Image (cartoon, rainbow, N blue to C red):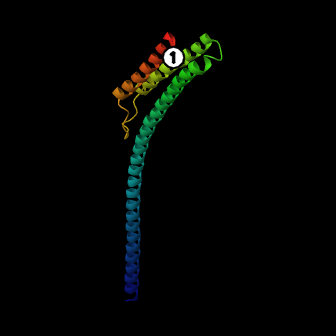
Amino acid sequence: MAGTESSEGAAKAAVRQTSAAAQKAATAHVKLARSAGRLEESAAQQTDSADRRTELAADRTVLAAERTYAAWMRTGLGALASGIGAQALLEKSIRPWLASGTAIVLVLFAVFCFGAGVWRELAQGTPPPRPDVHRIPPWLLIGFNGFLALVALAVLVGMLTR
């Protein structure tokens, strides 16, 4: 009977060990499944994050193009005002042909800046991904800059006929 009890005890111990090993394996499997789920979520978040970074880069590109357009307009308006001021102020200080020549060059540079600003804004090369911000409408750019170019040309004609 002692032999039977020891073999039954050994069998129970083996079952307990097998049950403990099965529990450990099941726990490890659950941990592995959770980890895989977190990895999938992380990969999805990284993909979403990369897409969002691309969209934000497109927005930055549009806003940078508008800042460049504004710089062309500032330069053109400054050149136009400088041309008018040069004609008015330098005419009595230096030779009239030199004052007129300086004024004409500044006004022509203003016309160039107005045209270059529109060209730079409308001809942007390869289009970026669809941005969230809206671009300035082309008809507004052409209309506004066309008006400024006409004003500059009218100033030029006024200078030449004076």
x and y percent of residue 104 in the render? 54, 15
Count neighbours of disc 1 (C-alpha within 10 A) and say few if under 14, some if 14 to 19, many if 20 or more: some
- Residue 28 in the image: above or below residue 49: below
Relative to 108, 126 lies left or right: left
Q: Which residue, given by chain and number where applicable, does mark 1 sit on?
A: 108
In the image shown, does 42 or 56 lie closer to the viewer?
56
x and y percent of residue 32 in the render? 40, 61
Q: Amino acid at mark 1?
A: Leu
Residue at position x 38%, y 53% in the image: 40
Residue at position x 40%, y 23% in the image: 147
Relative to 54, 90 lies left or right: right
Relative to 55, 87 lies left or right: right
Res 121 quadrant in image: top left
Q: How many numbered marks appear?
A: 1
In the image shown, does 19 or 63 lie closer to the viewer?
63
The N terminus appears in which quarter of the rendering? bottom left
Question: In terms of secondary structure, where does tag 1 sit?
Answer: helix
In the image shown, does 37 or 64 lie closer to the viewer?
64
